[in-house]
Image (cartoon, rainbow, N blue to C red):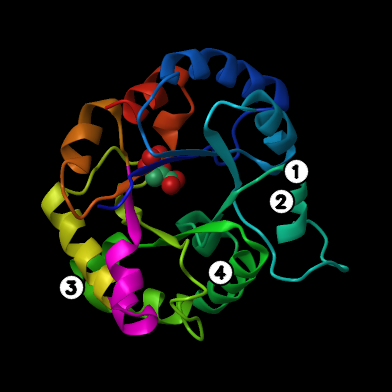
Amino acid sequence: MRKKVVAANWKMYKTPAQAREFFRDFLPLVSGHTRDEVVVCPPFVDLAAAVDATQGSGVAIGGQDLYWKAEGAFTGETSAAMLLAVGCTHVIIGHSERRQCFAETDDTVNLKLKCALEAGLIPIVCVGEVLEEREAGLTEEVLRRQCLRAFHALSGKKAGTLIVAYEPVWAIGTGKTATPELAAEAHALIRSEAAKSLGQDLADNLRILYGGSVKPENAATLMAEPEIDGALVGGASLDPKSFAAIVKY
Ligand code: PEP
């Protein structure tokens, strides 16, 4: 039985003060929750405030990205050691907005994934097709390529904590949600790619989250699907009440 994960991606929203306000309202709403893993990934400048505000709450904090070098002249970047030092346990890698707006490639996703695992951060690797790819019947090919390249030169032993998020790009922030059946199909494909690259054991235990317009109204239906091991939530995670409703669906 795989443990479900509900993760929030705040993108470029909220200042440290707003992050504190969020947790002041959110934590009482989820106290005693039975969700196995709840993670919030705020912007970098909010991380210290978020870690401080969630001490002892069972809510984990993650970065939205990292750079694979230990340190150096890499203006604007953040290392795994920096994320760990501030109290992060998780990190999102390869979000479609990084791929589309900031030239993230399958190869940099691989470098970041290896770096996160080596450092002991729990990686949440995002994969997913854009609308044109789905309409052209290329979804399988795209997901296979993204997985194959992301998992390149990794062993199942090293990748034990890996989490993958299937995020069809046409469903992100659009209000369009994949049906549970369609998501399950993609998740099964990702799991079979993980088995090929990382071994059957890892694939059987791999948590694959669905992301793309998850809301309190559709969370229960999506997560009732056995292939869906949780959710990566953007817009609906910014409001304490709606994110709490998703956590407790
Ligand atoms: C995301 O950005 O990872 C996401 C799934 O966004 P939204 O929930 O707003 O579609």
The residue under label 1 is 86
The residue under label 4 is 113
Q: Counting other residues with Cα less than 10 Å from the Cα at mark 4, is it few (<14), some (14-19), or many (20 or more)? A: many
Name the dominant secondary structure of the magenta segment: helix
The relative height of residue 14 versus residue 170 in the rendered view (above or below) is above
Could you say which quadrant of the image residue 86 lies in?
A: top right
Please tell me which of labels 1 and 4 falls first in the chain. Answer: 1
Q: Specify whether tag 4 is near ligand 1 (CB below 8 Å).
A: no
Mark 3 or 1: in front is: 1
| Alpha carbon distance from label 4 to label 2 | 14 Å
Residue 137: which disc?
3
Q: Secondary structure at mark 3?
A: loop
The residue under label 2 is 83
Q: Counting other residues with Cα less than 10 Å from the Cα at mark 1, is it few (<14), some (14-19), or many (20 or more)? A: some
| Residue displayed at 23% across by 43% down | 177
| Alpha carbon distance from label 3 to label 2 | 38 Å
Relative placement, left or right, of 167 versus 114 is left
> Which of 152 and 77 lies nearest the eye of the viewer?
152
Q: Is residue 77 among the parts visible in the rendering?
A: no
Mark 3 or 4: in front is: 4
Residue bounds of the magenta highlight: 193-212
Please tell me which of labels 4 and 2 falls first in the chain. Answer: 2
- Which of the four quarters of the rendered structure image does ligand 1 lie in? top left
Relative placement, left or right, of 16 versus 96 is right
Does the segment drawn in magenta span residue 5? Answer: no
> Which of 133 and 82 lies nearest the eye of the viewer?
82
| Residue displayed at 66% across by 30% down | 50
Tell me if label 2 and label 1 are in contact, CB under 8 Å. Answer: yes
Tell me if label 4 and label 2 are in contact, CB under 8 Å. Answer: no
